[in-house]
Amino acid sequence: MQARTSALAPLYSITIALCSLLIAACAGNGEGLDGDGRPLESGGSPPPPLSADFASIQANVFTPICSVCHVGGGAPQGLRLDADNSYNLLVGVPSTEVPSVLRVKPGDPDNSYIIQKLENHQAVGAQMPFGCPTSLPCLPATTIAFIRQWITDGAPAAAAAATVTAHLAVTAIVPDSTEPVTGSPPQIMVAFNRDLDVSQLATHTVHIEKLAPGAAPVVTENVPARISAPQGNLRALLIWPSRPLAVGHYRVVIDAESSARFSDIAGQSVSIGAPDELGEPVLSTFDVEVVP
Amino acid sequence: MIQRLTLAALVLAVLAVLCAAPASAEPYLAVMTGYKCNVCHVNPTGGGLRNDFGITYAKVLLPAETVDNALDSWTGKIGDRLRVGGDLRADWTRNSAPNTPSQQAFSLDQVRVYADLTLIPDRLGIYVDEQIAPGGSQNEEAYVRYGSTTDGFYVKGGQFYLPFGWRLQDQTAFVRQVTGINMTTPDKGIELGYEHAAWSAQFDVTNGLANATSGSGFQVTSQVVYTKPIWRVGISGSSTQSDAGNRNMGGLFAGLKTGPIAWLAEGDIVRDDSFPGGRTLDAALLEADIRIRRGHNLKLTAEYSDPDRSVHNDQQTRYSIVYEYTPLPFLQVRAGYRHYFGIPQNDQQNQQLVLFELHGFF
């Protein structure tokens, strides 16, 4: 027994040495590297914020998250999602798991396999990123919305992205000055022509002012309000007065310290509302009339 | 009492039969017991469907408590030729990373069913491993096998997992991610295998994962393992020829039992020419499984990964502690904590994970 133990002594020593090495191993300090662990090039800039263009999705999603596995000669399904290869292997390419479905079908996010895999309604296999939600976080819905919008826009390569997108604009505000509203409106609705980036939205950045009759606007009452996006619809904003509005003349004002610019998920922004006497953007004016 | 004695006798009988033949299991169990993979699994390279001994071990030796009438006669066999089995893992997890809202969720990690049909006893069989949830159904393994998987040569043809290093339960382990060979990345081709006494060897020719889109190129993978009762050592190699760029990798792995602790170690190095200018990656794993008492296992893991050896300061490490409790036959409860350490500018490389898992199997 003793002889056996002494014969194994080198194995125990190797085990202890390996243990010490691995436990003592330190993660890199990241000095001189970008967020993906690649050397910073001189004059290099940090990745752009996430928006619905390919370069941004590559820099914020494909490279840091997907290409942990989908890279190099061992990429699952032959799908390499590093910056050099991802576009050519995604757009218009049949998926290997369901060849009848394209990985990215320009203009049709619902029938793009990448969306199906990210949203977990794929016909075959596991949700991506692999291991989510068990071993790592799934992509947030807002991130997937950016990828959806990029596909909806025709999945253009980065250089062409800006040319195909329409400018963000307000298409309607209800109520507005063209028609008085009978009784207190439960909410004010603002409609846009493109999906908004609601992650940029602050809840209490708007209020409603009651104005005295007269040529110059005199504020007689401030009604706090909150702003929100309706569930499942990123093309509208709802503004909710904190209490019913009595008969009178009102205007909806965005707080001066808050940004009056709203962004869509492609990163385009728009200023809404003309400035009032204090420089605060007025979103809408309307009259509340007595209920007959 | 009589039933327990009967089961114990059955275990001893199966052991007596199998000890003469080369014999493995879930890696730490294999190291702890000194068995080869094919002692407990139908697949000679391990994982998936359990054989008679694997099921009996799961009923009698693995759990903290044996239960009378708990599928006493169940061995996975339906008739003489068909054997079935399955695994279900349900989790509650909480992920947190710097500058990122935490995510927590109940989830179905996997539901898997296995079947093996013996066409000619000890010579010809068909094996299927199908993941049926979550998401869509996905075939993991499906192959025809000819020859002996316990002593001698065998050939597999179809789709199967490649033999490379420890076949770990955690497919996100650095050694399994860096090599790209794990139990989510089966490949199609043929495997020539050899099992005799302490030796196990495989030689595979497959399409290669990188060639799934291009349809050209191939991958050659080989592994040799030498198993002794309290230690084992293995060497693996793989080469992929691909239009995307060739990829070559090698690995060493070993297991050692010291008292109540099973040690697993693996080190891999990968040269991947599909990157501009090529890139050399490496990864290492050290795992200690401490058998507290029957049915209780404490798993400590330290991992290291260097995604590009020519770049300084980009290394990543990962440490895990997982308690595995098997209270009853066919049921395991796992609770664990994992901390990733990476470059500070990458939040995902510094995430933390808390995990609770229910694992049912048969």
Image (cartoon, coloured by chain):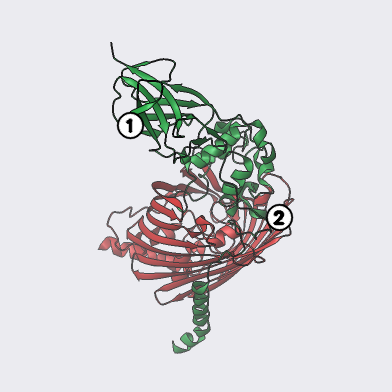
Chain colours: A green, B red
Depicted A95 relative to depicted B275: above or below: above
- Which one is closest to the eye, mark 1 or mark 2? 1
| Badge 2 amino acid | Ser
Q: Residues within 10 Å of mark 1 (few under 14, many from 20)?
A: few
Res B236 visible:
no
Q: Mark 1 = which residue?
A: A222
In which quadrant is the C terminus of chain A drawn? top left
* Coordinates of residue B178 in the picture (x, y in percent): 59, 60
Relative depth, front residue between B79 and A204: A204
Q: Quadrant of residue B72?
A: bottom left
Kindly identify the residue that appears in the image at 30 percent across and 19 percent down.
A247
Can residue A47 be seen here? The reply is: yes
Quarter where residue A268 is shown: top right
Q: Secondary structure at mark 2?
A: loop
Which residue is disc 2 drawn over? B274
Left or right, A241 with respect to A146, comes to left
- Kind of residue indicated by mark 1: Asn
Q: Is residue A11 left or right of residue A225?
A: right
Q: Quadrant of residue B320?
A: bottom left
